[in-house]
Amino acid sequence: MTVVIGFEGSANKIGIGIIRDGEVLSNPRRTYITPPGHGFMPSDTARHHRAVILTVLKEALEQAGLKPADIDCVAYTKGPGMGAPLVTVALVARTVAQLWGKPLLGVNHCIGHVEMGRLITQANNPTVLYVSGGNTQVIAYSERRYRIFGETIDIAVGNCLDRFARVIKISNDPSPGYNIEQMAKKGSQYVELPYTVKGMDVSFSGILSYIEETLFSMLVEITERAMAHCGSQEVLIVGGVGCNLRLQEMMGVMCKERGAKLFATDERFCIDNGAMIAQAGWEMFRSGQVTELEDSWITQRYRTDEVEVTWRD
């Protein structure tokens, strides 16, 4: 049996999860929440993470019923993400790895979402729609890489929703996107707004002119194009925005029309969490990867397709 602990803190969530051979043993998390109309600054977010990370670590071990000696590898988010929060979590992960005498492994945040989604849903080889506050990508696996078939050419869909929420001062608790979703459920009239799909890419730069229905229609369109290109009959939605039930519903309609299957997870695993880093770390560690201490830096820019996927055929 292989046990991996994962540290995630690339944005306003700080989470630590433990995975043992595909089983989630623990996955506690904290969220830095700001007042309505405000975003979260990197320095303030890092300060929040520093204040709670040891408490979350204790919870993760206690919930899993494990001791440091039971851990085989320490995984942490190398990037992409916000610089100050990434550094905070990486420092703790490096320290823990040295204190416990365990190998260290830097994980791509996006790969963490994909591998967690594959584990929880048991999707085989899906076309992946990865939608979050910092990323919007349509991904498919080919020849030891997660290839990006389409992406945003400006801001991510989650960032778009967050900025819209700030302008009209929607609460950030539990998240702007969730509160927008609840308000949208009460709507009864569709207002036609700019719809910008450019080949396989999308543009959300007119952020204050967009709402859910238009944003999600664009995402469904480019996902369907990637499916056609890959001959895929599965779609997996990952990332924080992937919790949105309307997005899942719209994607489900498209999949049904194509005779395809839709896979998605709930807020436990689609929102940033430590278990997803642990799961990706588990896959990487089992395939022989480790990160030497001198190479355990972080990077704010770390594309999904930069990672060699040594654990898949």
Image (cartoon, helix red, strand yellow):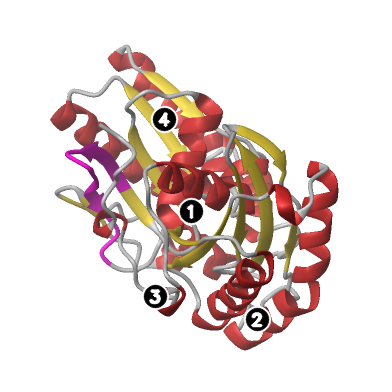
Query: Mark 3: which amino acid?
Result: Asp
SS class, disc 2: helix
Q: Which residue appears at 25% of the width and 38% of the height?
A: 141
Q: Position of residue 302 (x, y in %)?
A: 34, 67
- Comparing 289 with 210, the one in front is 289
**Label 3 crowding class (10 Å Cα cut-off): few <14, some 14-19, many 20+?**
few
Q: With 258 as the anchor, is 64 left or right in this view?
A: right
- Comparing 226 with 166, the one in front is 226
- Comparing 177 with 106, the one in front is 106
Judge whether residue 196 can be spotted in this image. Answer: no
Q: Position of residue 64 (x, y in %)?
A: 78, 43
Judged by depth in the image, the label closer to the viewer, 4 or 2, is 2
Judged by depth in the image, the label closer to the viewer, 2 or 3, is 3
Residue where numbered disc 4 is placed: 251
Q: Position of residue 82 (x, y in %)?
A: 50, 76
User: Which sits earlier in the primary sequence, circle 3 or circle 4?
Assistant: 4
Can you tell which quarter of the image residue 245 is in? top right
User: Which sits earlier in the primary sequence, circle 1 or circle 2?
Assistant: 2
Query: Mark 1: which amino acid?
Result: Ile
- Comparing 262 with 90, the one in front is 90
**Marks 1/4: CA–CA distance:** 17 Å
Query: Mark 4: which amino acid?
Result: Met
User: Which sits earlier in the primary sequence, circle 1 or circle 4?
Assistant: 1
Disc 3 to disc 1: CB gap under 8 Å: no
Judged by depth in the image, the label closer to the viewer, 3 or 1, is 3
Judged from this view, the residue extending furthest toward the top is 259
Disc 4 to disc 2: CB gap under 8 Å: no
Residue range (magenta)? 138-153
Residue where numbered disc 3 is placed: 295
